[in-house]
Image (spheres, rainbow, N blue to C red):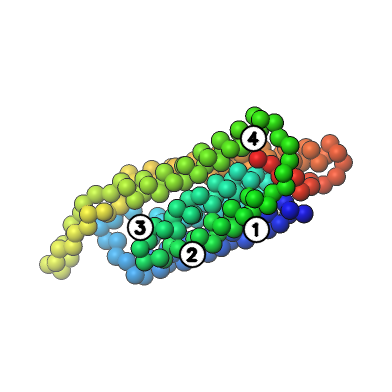
Amino acid sequence: MAWNGAIRLGLLAAAIDFLLAAGLWILLTLITHSGGDAVSRPLGLGVLFAAPGIVGLLGAIGRRRSLLAAAAIPLFAGSFLSWAFVTLPFLVPSLLFARAATRVDAQPLSASARIAGAAAGLVVALLMLAAGVAFLGFTEDTCLNQDGQSSCSSAATTVLGGATAVGLAGLAIAVAAVWASVGRRANLESATAIGHEPDAAGEA
């Protein structure tokens, strides 16, 4: 069934995203110097790129197309973050999440349910985008003196930026978890009411 295919795509996209996020963290740790950063830039970016994977995973488990779509948006935007194209591979999980969202079986929903689903997905996506903006935007000028040589940076990460990013990403995941839980519970109740296992019907 289409929704079973959507679940598989969502799980695959999440797995790829987690692997790419870990790879990005390791790569940036090896090739960049973040001595002036208050918060490790490689670790921060790795966490931020992993957050959509968590949201997409929750969307697959909770059968929420809005969360699958929400996971695709920040990954798509983030894939163009680096001029060196090291973030371009994140287009793959982004497109897989988007495809998973479109493969959900259509199901008649009330206007309020459609609005709630769209609102939840939009809020989650915006929170994750805002987390990235906070981490990369709340920077400061710093200079370090090592072995008699001065090294300066005009975009060093800050504790404020890191804390804000973690808070926003955490809030996005929390909202996604609540919405996924509601969807999963509704699906189980519907299946119990008609006397069979949860079917391929998708939720908003």
Residue, x 83% and y 39% (percent of image)?
Answer: 192
Contact between labelled residues 2 and 3, with CB atoms less than 8 Å apart: no
Residue at label 3? 41
Q: Position of residue 132 (x, y in %)?
A: 40, 49
Q: Dot 1 surroundings within 10 Å: few (below 14), some, or many (20 or more)?
A: many
Q: Residues within 10 Å of mark 2 (few under 14, many from 20)?
A: some
Q: Distance between the Cα atoms at labels 3 and 1?
A: 30 Å
2 or 4: tag closer to the N-terminus: 2
Which picture quadrant has residue 43? Answer: bottom left
Circle 3 crowding by C-alpha within 10 Å: few under 14, some 14–19, many from 20: many
Front of the two marks 3 and 2: 2
- For the C terminus, give its image quadrant: top right
Q: Nearer the viewer, residue 203 or 135?
A: 203
Q: Secondary structure at mark 1?
A: helix
User: Which mark is in front, 4 or 1?
Assistant: 4
Amino acid carrying label 1: it is Leu
Q: Which residue is mark 1?
A: 9
Residue type (three-letter) at the residue carrying disc 3: Arg
- The mark closer to the camera, 4 or 3, is 4
Q: Dot 2 corresponds to which residue?
A: 89
Question: Which numbered marker is on residue 114?
Answer: 4
* SS under mark 3: helix
| Residue that lies at the very extreme toward the top in this rendered image | 112
| Mark nearer the N terminus (3 vs 2) | 3
Quadrant in the rendering for residue 28? bottom left
The relative height of residue 199 versus residue 35 in the rendered view (above or below) is: above
- Image marks 1 and 2: residues in contact by CB distance under 8 Å: no
The residue at the point 40 percent across, 68 percent down is 27
